[in-house]
Image (cartoon, helix red, strand yellow):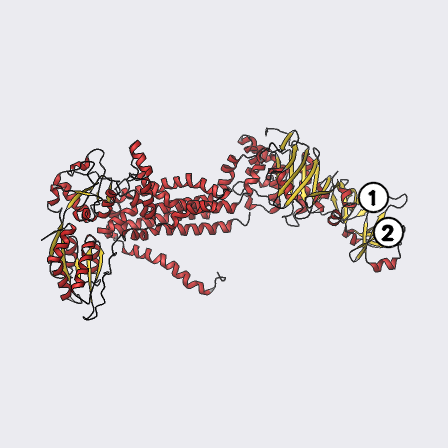
Amino acid sequence: MTGERSDPLVGTSRLAADVTVVRGSFELEVSLEVAAGEVVAVLGSNGAGKSTLLGALAGLYRPSRGEIVLGERTLSSPSETVPVHRRRIGLLSQQALLFPHLSALDNVAFGPRSTGSGRGNARRTAERWLAEVDAGALAGRRPAQLSGGQAQRVAIARALACEPELLMLDEPFAALDVDATPAVRSLVRRVVRATGVTTLVVTHDVLDAVVLADRIVVLDAGRVVESGTTTDVLTRPRSAFAARIAGLDLVPGRSRADGLVTAEGTVVAGTHPEPVDDGERAVALFAPASVAVFREEPGGSPRTALRVRLAALEPHGELVRLRASPVPGGPEWVEGLAADVTPAAIAELGVEPGDEVWFAVKAAEVTVHPAGR
Amino acid sequence: MSTQPPPRTARRGAVLVAALVALLGLPLAACGGSGSGSDSGSGSSGQSPAAQAPAKTLTVSAAASLTEVYQSLGQQFQAANPGVTVKFNFGGSDQLAQQVVQGAPADVLATASPTTMQTAVAAGKIQGDPLIYATNKLQIAVAPNNPKQITSLADLNKPGVTSVVCAPAVPCGAAATAAEKAANVTLKPVSEEQDVKGVLTRVETGNADGGLVYVTDVKSAAGKVAGVDFPQASAKGVTQTYPIGVVTGSADPQLAQSWVSFVTGPQGKAALTQAGFATK
Amino acid sequence: MSGVPRFLWVPAVLAWLLVAVPVVGLVVRVDLSNFVSLVTSDAALAALWLSLKTGLATMVCCLVLGGPLAVVLARSHLPGLPFIRSVVLLPLVLPPVVGGLTLLFLLGRTGPVGAFLYDRFDITVPFSTTAVVLAQTFVAMPFLVVSLEGSLRTAGERYEAVAATLGASPVTTLWRVTIPVVLPGLLSGSVLAFARALGEFGATITFAGSLQGTTRTLPLLIYLQSQDDIDGAVAMSLVLVVVAILVIVVSRTRDVR
């Protein structure tokens, strides 16, 4: 580790892990690959094995079987284990866990110092990374003087200043105020994209996956139950579990001032909870329950109306879920969009599979987020 | 992180309080250390519930070095005077004299030096003149068979000989200093003990080769140490003299006087001699 | 303080008075006219200097030996840890005199280790300043260990885990993270050990003896003087109280910062 590089990019390496980890009565058995520079989100509910996976990769738990390979190096195999501090895996968790006795700058300089950089070099590296996360002004502050969001920014800089080959984010926004989350999330997105570091995001929040990840791996009861691109997993979940945690309507496109425009020009009106530049890749998200279904094209308040063909009607709790498929000549991306309506509304509409209807959603119900590639 | 400071401060506060307690705990520790045998024999063991005579209690404040002798004399006295209970208050002579001056209940005061007795006399707390009835001499306590061949005070300064004495502030230390003066020797002890029993223990446990103690102490050690006489032990100010007197305001001066007569009489003399005291 | 139940006030005030009143009594009893000459006598200065010197040496011993012990107790997963811990705490409950006796039976000239040292190397441990430090360390060590182990457990291993992911070796982590994070506990534990050493009496007099300039610390001098010179003893006691207050003030200053 040189620590002397002048370019702010960190090394990118491919991660390949195929391990079994036993902790008490819980067993995690996963095979996972993350390409160099790829951002993969691991989704799962509490107890699915997310922390165990991270712990095994970081070197806190020893797998009972299998190998972990990062770049050229075997981190863990039946015959060898690389200790935590030589793995070059950065970890950002819910709590920033900044060292309370060091200033923000010294926190960031800690990694470079520990791995052999001189005081001056470490300091310059730290200053650069603080600037990178827009926290240059916080350099002299103690962790106790930082807000949760500020602390998390500094923690990101600290993790990246070590030039990790793999960055792991463990529920990185779960402990933040709701108000602080969008800004920190888009910052993480920007920094991760800018550095091109291979990243694993562990989260139970679908939004984190949408914003940060190229690919989603769904973990349930210690096993990978589903894996695919973010759009695929969220819009066409193949496992019941993924369907439950996803369950959102998602429209890919590019951001514009009043929402999002799809590739063929359909505008989905919505709001931007976090800053997205016009023309940037984005997704529009909305809940199926906020979708209204009409036989004729609706007008009125700012809303988006999409012409779709009904593919299926499924019971969904006390509601009925209508699944969309494209109309002839219409956009393909409507495939899988869902609308949840009451049985009474179905009876009134008198619709059945094969009918063409309008799915309408108000702008206020739609949020537009920057998206993975 | 934000939750850290309050518990830490609170804990530190507790630690500070504990530090204060640790420091102030000193006087307590000192008291605990001093209590070695000072009132070990306050009750007399042979309490015969002989109810024919009116029950009387005699309280005797006596120097710690008299403990064994007085306890055995107490039993004899009780046997001879049915209905009488003798209670002892053993302690340092200075302390005992101070207590009597302060009005502590005592019928008889028996100290280990005229000086301490004089404290009580000067305060008008002793009826008549105190009586000097016994003396005690210094001896050099050595390991049995005297392996280091110590025969004089000067021998205690021989290379390879470790010696202990009492601190000059306490009576046995004052006697030791006077003996050194008489012998024209300056001892180089490794420790100056708080009391004569401390000196004896050092020799008994083999941590010192020689120590200045009283003949009575050597006797009480029952063979664990041997005593070596030296000429200066009889010099002026070296020999310890034991005065006894009846305390003014005693509830039963007659009974108190009979204890004095008993101790200074034949039975008392026998017991004192047996313990190593010289009697007059 | 509205949250304090009223009935707690009486015992609380009594507890405070129990400590405060005797100290006030001591101060009142001091013979002020001779105070300076009493506390600047050769014996007093020698004892004060010896107490400070051995107290600091004890503190260093506690840090060097007790510090690592606290880390082992807080961080390792040895079997029988509760047993090991209870042995460490033994001096807290034992009368110090017993501690002195155990040291004497081990290191005295006839003890197994002491006899070896004496016969082989002509080293006599009792009656030396080293013996004072040993006795004080014996009684003061648990204060540091308990305080530091508490701090280590409160801090947890989170920061150490983070440091490792940042590339810090266990040794680097110890110096640059663990120690700074538990520094308050380390300092208060050291202050506590120093204070306990200053007040140590029973183990010292039993094991080390009492000789001016070598083994007669302030508490030993106070006890000795209490036999024939109460004024001197009281004056020296006041000095000890002042030192105690100084220790507290120093720690407080750090607290405020």
Circle 2 SS class: strand
**Same chain for marks 2 and 1?**
yes
Does residue A139 appear in this view? no
Amino acid type indicated by mark 2: Trp
Q: Residues within 10 Å of mark 1 (few under 14, many from 20)?
A: some
Q: Earlier in the sequence, mark 2 or mark 1?
A: 1
Q: Chain of mark 2?
A: A
Q: Is residue A106 above or below residue C9?
A: above
Residue C44 placement (x, y as % from top left): 26, 45
Identify the residue at horizontal 38%, vertical 50% (top origin): C93
Q: Which residue is mark 1?
A: A333
Q: Chain of mark 1?
A: A
Residue C163 placement (x, y as % from top left): 56, 38
Viewer-closest of B108 and A185:
B108
Q: Is residue B277 above or below residue B180?
A: below
Amino acid type indicated by mark 1: Trp
Q: Residues within 10 Å of mark 2 (few under 14, many from 20)?
A: many
Circle 1 SS class: helix
The Cα atoms of the two marked residues, 2 and 1, are separated by 15 Å
Identify the residue at horizontal 61%, vertical 32% (top origin): A79
Q: Quadrant of residue B182?
A: top left
Q: Which residue is mark 2?
A: A358
Residue C180 placement (x, y as % from top left): 49, 41
